[in-house]
Image (cartoon, coloured by chain):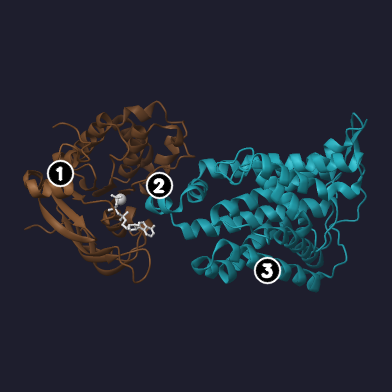
Chain colours: A cyan, B brown
């Protein structure tokens, strides 16, 4: 028996988990299911790709950090793209969600986000075509780790990145004023105002952070698989499954939920067949909603 | 009054939906260092009035001023910077955060150098909280929660502290403790505006009182005079009959 599914699942799970952290934050603070979150992932990947291309065009193509497939341009581009994806989320909020928040109900926001998701995807296809793109065509040699597990250097680097980002998020939410303010607004917006928190500023920070995290997921997926306009949208179901499994509002819950979804998917691919991959997230989602609607670490009932 | 009041609300109309005022022209003033209590039957609009002062409910008419500065349409989150602290009637602590985090959050408006010393001062004032500082606030008992809510409000060293029914849901012994704390806090120079159902306990520490009914002032006077007026006591304060909703402490 090969334990390869564990390695594949952990990797996919880390990627899903990061996306789910952003989703769970925007859900618990803005109180609606944001379907554009998947498209922030795609936009993050394409923005990184475009900036990498720009750097290569202006400065001579740079070498890569052996044994990885990428060099410093990707790191610079990734940081810039995180900021830009955050700004994209912020822009979408002020153009679309903010006016609706004043008047509309939750369901209006969900439908609006669905429409915006379609538009964001169409725009990517228009700008970059629907042909898959790649950060690098360099061949990665998978390293055997024993127990039949093989992992590429890129995958290891991305796991390290995911770990750093999650720890940074944890510190942000527990040690900084903006992080504590985000938790406060998610629990009780009226009381947050009473203690002097500017809720509008917290909402802006949430979009910036959620967009930046989505961008990291997009880069992880782009480096290890490929970049497509659909890539983020296709992740939506696993993202929601992870966020709900972990418990809405819980960062560690979203990460753990992501790992569970990722490993379950990889196990299904290895033993049942690849065509069942997408059913796994769906089954997990329904099972959680039926058995424990508030998820593993949820603070509020469904 | 000869001196200008610290907190003034004149002819305030406020409500949750446009055209449906709940507070229909209420006026109160609170002088420096006073404890003033607003009493009245359920649904009179007491909470709505205090929330309107705190900036949480839109004001459609009238004037509110703090230390002479107009705050009528000021957003709620700016009030703490002006020295106005508010303890809401329900859900007045962040249950998912630790006691320390609740205080840190509230202390953010204080100068950085003072935050830790203020938190320690709160733990000295409320020793019950001190040995539970890492506990999620949602796991505190009702009385401890109320103490934390008051401590949280005091973190900004307010000039005016407003509380909405701090005695709600507490045992008579705990009501006594909370009100004793409020009297102690007033001695440090904090002006207090209180909304209460528990007329007996509130009047015992208050200087003056207002009685609100249907969103309007019905009576006002010194706490002692209102408590002594048999008509008012029977009608509004539940102090008259033996089977009235009496849940206060013995003086
Ligand atoms: N958030 C709200 N939205 C709409 N109406 C509200 C809201 N809160 C209170 N009301 C209405 O306003 C009226 C006055 O409520 P308020 O809470 O101000 O009374 P109160 O004097 O504080 O009563 P109690 O002693 O029961 O706390 C009630 O009729 C209530 O139904
Ligand atoms: Mg009330």
* Residue at mark 2: B108
Furthest residue toward bottom: A126
Residue displayed at 61% across by 67% down: A92
Q: Is residue A142 left or right of residue B204?
A: right
B162 w.r.t. A291: above or below: below
Q: Is the C-beta of the residue carrying label 2 under 8 Å from the nearest atom of ligand 1? A: no
Q: Position of residue A109 (x, y in %)?
A: 60, 64
Q: Earlier in the sequence, mark 1 or mark 2?
A: 2
Q: Is residue A230 left or right of residue B193?
A: right
Residue displayed at 80% across by 45% down: A280
- SS for tag 3? helix
- SS for tag 2? helix
* Residue at mark 1: B206
- Placement of the N terminus of chain B among the 4 image quadrants: bottom left
Alpha carbon of mark 1 to alpha carbon of mark 2: how far? 31 Å
* Residue at mark 3: A116
Q: Position of residue B116 (x, y in %)?
A: 38, 37
Q: Is residue A258 left or right of residue A204?
A: right
Front in this rendered view, residue A3 or B217: B217
Q: Is residue B60 visible?
A: yes
């Amino acid at each position: 028996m090969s334990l390869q599914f564990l390695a594949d699942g952990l990797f996919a799970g880390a990627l899903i988990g990061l996306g789910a952290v952003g989703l769970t934050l925007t859900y618990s603070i803005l109180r609606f299911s944001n379907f554009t979150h998947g498209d922030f992932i795609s936009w993050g990947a394409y923005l990184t790709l475009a900036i990498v291309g720009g750097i290569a065009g202006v400065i001579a193509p740079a070498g890569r950090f052996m044994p990885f497939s990428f060099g410093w341009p990707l790191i610079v581009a990734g940081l810039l793209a995180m900021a830009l994806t955050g700004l994209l989320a912020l822009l979408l909020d002020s153009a679309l969600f903010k006016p609706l928040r004043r008047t509309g109900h939750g369901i209006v926001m969900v439908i609006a986000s669905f429409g915006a998701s379609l538009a964001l995807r169409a725009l990517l296809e228009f700008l970059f075509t629907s042909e898959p793109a790649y950060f690098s065509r360099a061949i990665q040699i998978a390293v055997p780790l024993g127990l039949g597990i093989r992992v590429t250097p890129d995958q290891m680097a991305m796991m390290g990145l995911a770990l750093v980002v999650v720890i940074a998020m944890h510190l942000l939410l527990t040690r900084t004023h903006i992080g504590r303010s985000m938790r406060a607004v998610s629990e009780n917006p009226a009381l947050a105002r009473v203690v002097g928190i500017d809720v509008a500023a917290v909402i802006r920070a949430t979009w910036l952070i959620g967009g930046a995290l989505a961008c990291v997921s997009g880069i992880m997926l782009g480096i290890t698989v490929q970049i497509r306009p659909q890539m983020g949208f296709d992740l939506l179901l696993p993202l929601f499954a992870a966020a709900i499994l972990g418990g809405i509002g819980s960062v560690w819950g979203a990460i753990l939920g992501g790992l569970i979804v990722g490993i379950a998917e990889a196990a299904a691919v290895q033993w049942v067949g690849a065509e069942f991959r997408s059913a796994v997230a769906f089954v997990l989602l329904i099972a959680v909603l039926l058995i424990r609607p508030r998820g593993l670490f949820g603070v509020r009932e469904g | 009054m000869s001196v200008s009041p610290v907190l003034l609300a004149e002819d305030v109309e406020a409500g949750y939906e446009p055209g449906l005022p709940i507070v229909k022209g209420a006026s109160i003033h609170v002088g420096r260092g006073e404890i003033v209590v607003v009493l009245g039957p359920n649904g009179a609009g007491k909470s709505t009035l205090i929330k309107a002062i705190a900036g949480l409910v839109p004001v459609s008419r009238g004037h509110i001023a703090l230390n002479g500065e107009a705050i009528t349409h000021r957003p709620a989150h700016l009030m703490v910077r002006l020295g106005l602290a508010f303890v809401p009637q329900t859900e007045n602590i962040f249950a998912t955060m630790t006691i320390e985090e609740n205080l840190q959050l509230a202390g953010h408006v204080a100068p950085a150098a003072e935050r830790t010393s203020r938190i320690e001062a709160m733990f000295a004032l409320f020793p019950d909280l001190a040995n539970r500082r890492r506990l999620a606030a949602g796991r505190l008992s009702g009385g401890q929660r109320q103490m934390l809510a008051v401590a949280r409000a005091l973190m900004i060293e307010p000039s005016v502290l407003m509380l909405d029914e701090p005695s709600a849901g507490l045992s008579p012994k705990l009501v006594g403790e909370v009100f004793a704390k409020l009297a102690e806090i007033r001695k440090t120079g904090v002006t207090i505006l209180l909304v209460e159902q528990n007329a007996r306990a509130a009047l015992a520490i208050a200087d003056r009182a207002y009685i609100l009914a249907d969103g309007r002032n019905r009576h006002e006077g010194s706490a002692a005079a209102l408590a002594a007026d048999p008509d008012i006591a029977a009608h509004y304060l539940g102090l008259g009959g033996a089977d009235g909703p009496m849940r206060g402490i013995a003086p």
